[in-house]
């Protein structure tokens, strides 16, 4: 029997970014907004729903597209603070 509650994806504390997401351009290289976050560049398509991460040393830098910028902040924090990819990813 468990001695306490377990954290499920539904009950775990909400993720809080560790930096400030700054919009650096309304229309950037991909035709949508660009952002910076903790030294990373985030480039988005029009509408800002498909974005890419550019961060020196990160294995996904400029190679993979993600969802909204808020998804990428979690990826950047895990990499910069713990040297890892988020737990929900496959390596």
Image (cartoon, rainbow, N blue to C red):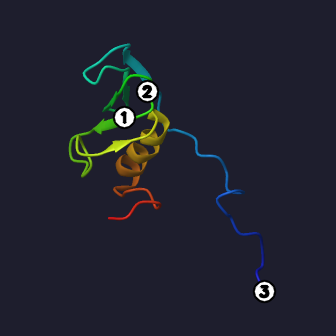
The numbered disc on residue 51 is 1
Q: Secondary structure at mark 2?
A: loop
Question: Left or right of 42: which side holds 63?
Answer: left
- Say whether marks 2 and 1 touch (CB < 8 Å): yes
Q: Which mark is residue 1?
A: 3
Using the image, tell me which numbered label, if any, was put on residue 48: 2
Q: Residue, x 45% and y 27% (percent of image)?
A: 21
Q: Secondary structure at mark 3?
A: loop
| CA distance for labels 1 and 3 | 44 Å
Q: Residues within 10 Å of mark 2 (few under 14, many from 20)?
A: some
Quadrant of image for the C terminus: bottom left
Nearest-to-viewer mark from 1 and 3: 1
In percent of the image, x 43 and y 27: which residue is there? 48
From this viewpoint, which residue is outermost toward the bottom?
1
Marks 2 and 3, the one that precedes in the sequence: 3
| Disc 2 to disc 3, C-alpha distance | 46 Å
Label whose residue precedes the other's in the sequence (1 or 3): 3
Q: Specify whether 30 is left or right of 51.
A: left
Q: Position of residue 23 (x, y in %)?
A: 41, 19
At 24% from the left and 43% from the top, the residue drawn is: 61
Q: CA distance from mark 2 to mark 1?
A: 7 Å
Number of residues whose C-alpha sits closer than 10 Å to that of mark 1, classed few (under 14), some (14–19) or many (20 or more): many
Q: Residue 45 location, x and y as percent?
A: 35, 27
Query: Is mark 1 in CB contact (under 8 Å) with mark 3?
Result: no
**In the image, is residue 16 above or below residue 10?**
above
Q: Is residue 22 above or below residue 74?
A: above
Residue pushed farthest top? 26
Task: Pick the residue in front: 27 or 9.
Answer: 27
Q: Secondary structure at mark 1?
A: strand
Please provide percent x and percent y for residue 49: 45, 32
Residue 54 falls in which quadrant of the image?
Answer: top left
């Amino acid at each position: 029997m468990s001695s306490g509650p377990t954290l499920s994806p539904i009950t775990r504390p909400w993720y809080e970014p560790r930096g400030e997401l700054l919009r650096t351009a309304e229309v950037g290289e991909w035709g949508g907004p660009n952002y910076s976050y903790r030294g990373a560049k985030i480039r988005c398509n029009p509408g800002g729903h498909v974005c890419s991460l550019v961060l020196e040393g990160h294995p996904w830098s400029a190679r993979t597209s993600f969802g909204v910028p808020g998804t990428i902040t979690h990826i950047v924090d895990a990499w910069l603070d713990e040297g890892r990819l988020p737990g929900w990813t496959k390596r």
